[in-house]
Image (cartoon, helix red, strand yellow):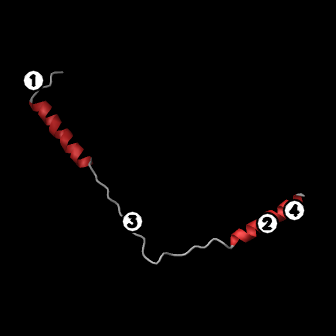
Amino acid sequence: MKIAAIMMAGLAAAALGGCIQVKAPDKPIEINLNVKIQQEVVVKLEKDAQDLINNNPELFPQ
């Protein structure tokens, strides 16, 4: 019984082995990256806020 199962598994593997095909695409692959970088804006805003606090200490008591 084990031999029959091993033979069936071998036949199934052999049958599936020929079904997979890898083919290169006709057109080049295009990767569109719409990435918005906001780090600079945050740093500028943070610096402006720090300058406002330093120049007007009465507005932001500690």
Q: Earlier in the sequence, mark 4 or mark 3?
A: 4
Q: Residue furthest top?
A: 62
Count of residue discs:
4
- CA distance for labels 4 and 1: 89 Å
In this rendering, the label closer to the viewer, 1 or 3: 3
In this rendering, the label closer to the viewer, 1 or 2: 2
Q: Earlier in the sequence, mark 2 or mark 3?
A: 2
Residue at x-position 42% and y-position 71%: 29
- Give the residue pinned by disc 4: 4
- CA distance for labels 1 and 3: 52 Å
- What amino acid type should be assigned to the residue bearing mark 3? Ile
Label 2, residues with CA under 10 Å away: few <14, some 14-19, many ≥20: few
- Give the residue pinned by disc 2: 10
- What amino acid type should be assigned to the residue bearing mark 4? Ala
CB atoms at circles 2 and 3 under 8 Å apart? Answer: no
- CA distance for labels 4 and 3: 49 Å
Is residue 39 found left or right of 45 in the rendered image? right
- What amino acid type should be assigned to the residue bearing mark 2? Gly
Quarter occupied by the N terminus: bottom right
Q: Earlier in the sequence, mark 4 or mark 1?
A: 4
In this rendering, the label closer to the viewer, 4 or 1: 4
- What amino acid type should be assigned to the residue bearing mark 1? Glu
In this rendering, the label closer to the viewer, 4 or 3: 4
In the image, is residue 54 above or below residue 17? above
- CA distance for labels 2 and 3: 41 Å
CB atoms at circles 4 and 1 under 8 Å apart? Answer: no
- Give the residue pinned by disc 3: 31
- Give the residue pinned by disc 1: 58
CB atoms at circles 1 and 3 under 8 Å apart? Answer: no
Q: Secondary structure at mark 4?
A: helix
CB atoms at circles 1 and 2 under 8 Å apart? Answer: no
Residue 6 percent location from the top left of the image = 83, 61
